[in-house]
Image (cartoon, helix red, strand yellow):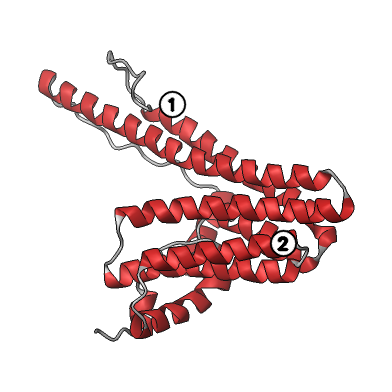
Amino acid sequence: MRTYSLDDVYATRKRRDSWWTVYFVDPVACRAALLVANHTRLTPNQLTVVSLVLGMVSAVCLAMDLLAAGAAMFYLSFMVDCLDGKIARLKGTGTPFGLWLDYVGDRIRVVCCATGLAYGQYAITGDVRYIVMGAAVAVVDLFRYVNAPQMKRVRETVKAEREADGEARAEEDEPEVRIPRQRPPTNRSRRLVRRINKAMARRRIRAHLISGIEFHAAVFVVAPLVGTVALIPVSAVASVSLLVNEGFLVHRMWLFTRKYSVPSTRSREHVLV
């Protein structure tokens, strides 16, 4: 069996990832991946199942008002969830079924942990706000996972129609001479944004700082570690921040469709079904 080095594991990291993963998960996950790859025969799918089991343990701890233990188990669950992808890329053992299992496992973990957190606090206090909190966390997370693939499909559809229309025009018309557009001078704020993005890219951090990973970390790790007093405020701020980020992404997609969509006589009713 091949022996892997830490550099081999580092090579499996995503080119850009969430800041929570880069700073708080990968330093642990990479070293754990090295141990798993060199000393066990665990497959990525088996690691996904382990991650799901740890997530269920986290949900039980949260339901029993063991907030610190629940936060620790959720962190371990997410760390192992990162581990399965690293092992899959390292050994080339990823499968399409593994993608499905990872996706479904993440959804089950979030729903169960949100339910456990809400139930545990409601059973103690009788405060219905915790039920609303748990439902809101589950719905916001579900919206994010439904929204992302649909936006991707819209972009792919627009690009496909644009390419098809361009090919049709090339067959019917003479090639047109395109004059390269000159970019308008960038102002100081745009240059600053670009510098920040480049600095973040060097550290593998994604441009948007609020994603599902930070959302989960805030609700199921940070807030429980702070204590009961932080559960509702942190969940509310994290939910609103995630929705704002999703709204920004939808707005960008809308601008993309306006700029690049092309007229077509074909019916589009089936495109996104």
The front one of 245 and 67 is 67
Local packing at callout 1 (Cα closer than 10 Å; few below 14, some 14-19, many 20+) is few
The quarter of the picture where the N terminus appears is: bottom left
Name the residue type under label 2: Leu
- At x 65%, y 56%, the residue is 113
- At x 48%, y 67%, the residue is 50
Residue 234 seen by the camera: no
The number of numbered discs placed on residues in the rendered structure image is 2
Asked whether, in this view, residue 113 is left or right of residue 37, the answer is right
Q: Please provide percent x and percent y for residue 83.
A: 44, 70
Asked whether, in this view, residue 259 is left or right of residue 193, the answer is left
Q: Earlier in the sequence, mark 1 or mark 2?
A: 2
Name the residue type under label 1: Arg
Q: Please provide percent x and percent y for residue 187.
A: 55, 47
SS at badge 2: helix
Q: Please provide percent x and percent y for residue 224.
A: 75, 64
The front one of 83 and 271 is 83
The front one of 210 and 150 is 150
Q: Which mark is residue 198?
A: none
The quarter of the picture where the C terminus appears is: top left
Asked whether, in this view, residue 238 is left or right of residue 180, the answer is right
Q: Please provide percent x and percent y for residue 248.
A: 57, 40
- At x 34%, y 21%, the residue is 270
- Front label number (1 vs 2): 2
Asked whether, in this view, residue 225 is left or right of residue 81, the answer is right
Q: Which mark is residue 62?
A: 2
Q: Are marks 1 and 2 in contact (CB under 8 Å)?
A: no
SS at badge 1: helix
- At x 50%, y 73%, the residue is 26
Distance between the Cα atoms at labels 1 and 2? 46 Å
- Which residue does the numbered mark 1 point to in the structure image? 258
